[in-house]
Amino acid sequence: MNRGPNTRFADLFALTGWSKGELARMVNRRGAAAGQQQLSTDTSRVRRWMERGEIPRDPVPRILAALFSEQLGRVVTPEDLGFQRERHSGPGARRGAPDSSRPAPGQTAAVLTEFTGMDLMLNRRGLMGASTALAAGAAIANPLYDWMRSPAAPPPPAGSSAAAVRSPSALPALDFYEAGPVGEDEVSALEESVEVFRRWDASRGGGLQRKAVVGQLNEVGGMLTYDHPDYLERRLWGVAANLAVLAGWMSHDVGLEPTAQKYFVMAVHAAREAEDKPRASEALARAARQMVHLGRAGDALDLMRVAEAGAGGGTLPRTRAMLRTVEAWAHASLGHSQATRRTLGEAEDLFAQDTGEPGPSWLQFFDLADLHGMQALTYRTLADHDPTAAPLAQRHALLALELREGGHDRSKLFDHISMASACYLANKPDEAQRYAQLALSATGEMSSHRTWDRLRQMYRLTARYERLPAVSELRSEISRAMPRKARPQII
């Protein structure tokens, strides 16, 4: 059937520099290496994929995804190539018919294992790189809006197969590990491992443990292709959601932005399978924070619209306060002074309603120190447009620093940067100098590109004071300390 041109495939193909014949030969060679001797791809077949939208049979889409990933240095899935995954109807397939905007659970698990497997493969071969192919906020948010508000999919009926099987098209060449079903003890151990990874990320940044988190998520995705008791499966999906958020946050922390965004979206789908709307909303809030960091605050507001709609009326006030701080940061980036102040006020009111209920593990990191830290960052951002916000940024940064406990080293470093930046904006270079030096001295201990991005923003604010000897020396120190790719231009 002629589906029309496959523009996704054509656009990525153009980036590779290959000819159609070259790609056809590589598909055949990779297939033969994986035991698929029957493949006979040729130039005309590649042309039909591109011009007519024909979808090759398994295992060709997986082979193509692996080849494109290696060539482009970032994870490329069959869906990225325009080859929509077919839902399997074998003994392990789920029953029921969820709406078309929501993937079946088995499909979500397959995407998890496939994407994480390719991510690990690229890192292992030293091919992982950044890309500018970041989706717009509305492109993510709009399809999810109704889906986030809809009831969760019904559980599989009693008597369904006890063990699903992997798709037979899995490629040995991609070196995926075959996981199996697990019990309650194993799920408890996985939940504990998430806490270990989360603490490490908060202390030292995302770079050093990212591959470990991705590997753990790959394992969990494999487990989820098998059936488990309903209560255990929801917990396992919860682990997958937490790991996907961490993988996304760590990827964002080291500058792998499209990869991070895909992990955040996976986390939303996994959280919904766990019937955990607040977790899905928090994952979208992380994606929104990424957008603000990258200068796309409008996209962040699109994502927050869905995050807040999906949180539901039963969501804890502290969770809703966290969502408001992200929305406020996006407004501040756009210079919306009234909206920023109003939204931060709502966040404070919601946080004050906190009853002390422990809440989920991921919410424990949003404490009073983090509330003040986000307020400091938001007011400091607003101060670029409204100078009267600078004193507020200083006040909240000081409160955050007073409240920070051990193990939150990266957040403390960001508080120092917020404080120094606010002081520069408030024409207090002497006071700023102390906090800027504290921030600079801590950056070498972080495996975090975001640290250098924030430091570069602070560096920009020092330009007006560069005639002061201390500031001039600080600027030289920052320039020398930064990784070569992150170094600011001397202005």
Image (cartoon, grey):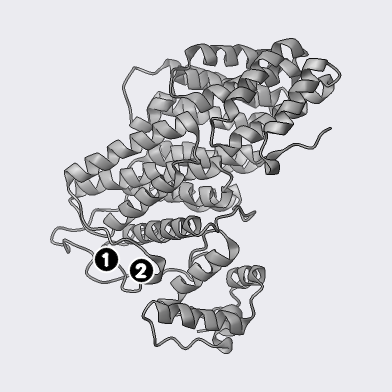
Q: Quadrant of residue 365?
A: top left
Residue type marked 2: Arg
Q: Quadrant of residue 107?
A: bottom left
Q: Which residue is mark 2?
A: 87
Q: Secondary structure at mark 1?
A: loop
Asked if residue 94 lies left or right of residue 279, the reply is left
Camera-side residue of 192 and 349: 192
Above or below, comparing residue 339 to residue 35 in the picture = above
Whole-percent x, y for residue 345 in the image: 55, 18
Q: Secondary structure at mark 2?
A: loop
Residue found at x 84% / y 32%? 491
Q: Do the residues under discs 2 and 1 have CB atoms within 8 angstroms?
A: yes
Residue type marked 1: Ala
Q: CA distance from mark 2 to mark 1?
A: 8 Å
Camera-side residue of 256 and 290: 256
Whole-percent x, y for residue 335 in the image: 71, 29
Residue 171, can we see it?
Answer: no
Q: Earlier in the sequence, mark 2 or mark 1?
A: 2
Q: Which residue is mark 1?
A: 93
**Other-residue count near label 2 (Cα within 10 Å), few / some / many at <14 / 14–19 / ≥20:** few
Camera-side residue of 26 and 13: 26
Residue found at x 61% / y 77%? 5
